[in-house]
Amino acid sequence: MKCLRLLCLATSFLIPLALPAQNPNAASPDQKHEIDVDGHLNKLTEALSLTPEQQQKVRPILKNFLQKREELLANGQISDSERTARIQTLHARADKQVRRLLSDDQRTKLTQLEQDSHTH
């Protein structure tokens, strides 16, 4: 009996996860994009201790990068290698813009984070 109750309880938590398309309050694609920008900004803020002023300047850089990346990912007219090259170019440009806004210590932390992410 306890197993049946536990199974029913677990299922009641999983069903909403399986039906996001039927949720009238689900985020629109634009809202999902905004959440993604905020998520990236929050991670950078936490990792680099960005000031509110830095956050305000970094946000449009991230938003522009993520929008252009999504456009490239959705573009079925270019090859995978071309898409990858263009995304790498966009990333390098955004990285350069963000680094200009950082202190020396923050740049060092960002370099370390990037190196760590490439080794994992």
Image: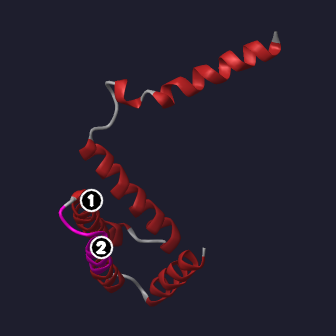
Magenta range: 77-90
85 in relation to 55, above or below: below
In the image, residue 116 above or below residue 37: below
Specify the farthest residue to the top: 1
**Distance CA(mark 2)–CA(mark 1):** 9 Å
Task: Inspect the image, locate mark 2, and give the three-letter code of the amino acid beneath it.
Answer: Ile
* Viewer-proximal residue among 61 and 102: 61
Q: In the rendered image, which residue does mark 2 sit on?
A: 87
Tell me residue 22's x, y (percent). 36, 24
Q: Is residue 110 positioned above or below 6 on the image?
A: below
Q: Position of residue 62 (x, y in %)?
A: 30, 67
Return the x and y of residue 104 as percentages of the image width and height: 45, 90
**SS at badge 1:** helix
* Quadrant assignment, res 8: top right
- Which residue type does callout 1 highlight? Glu
In the image shown, does 67 or 60 lie closer to the viewer? 67
Image x and y of residue 110, in percent: 48, 80
Look at the numbered disc 2 and give the secondary structure of its residue: helix
How crowded pointer 1 is (Cα within 10 Å; few <14, some 14-19, many 20+) is rated as few
Label 1, on which residue?
70
Q: Provide the major secondary structure of the magenta segment.
A: helix
Where residue 40 sits, quadrant-wise, is bottom left
Is mark 2 in CB contact (under 8 Å) with mark 1? no
Which residue is more in the foreground, 105 or 90?
Answer: 90
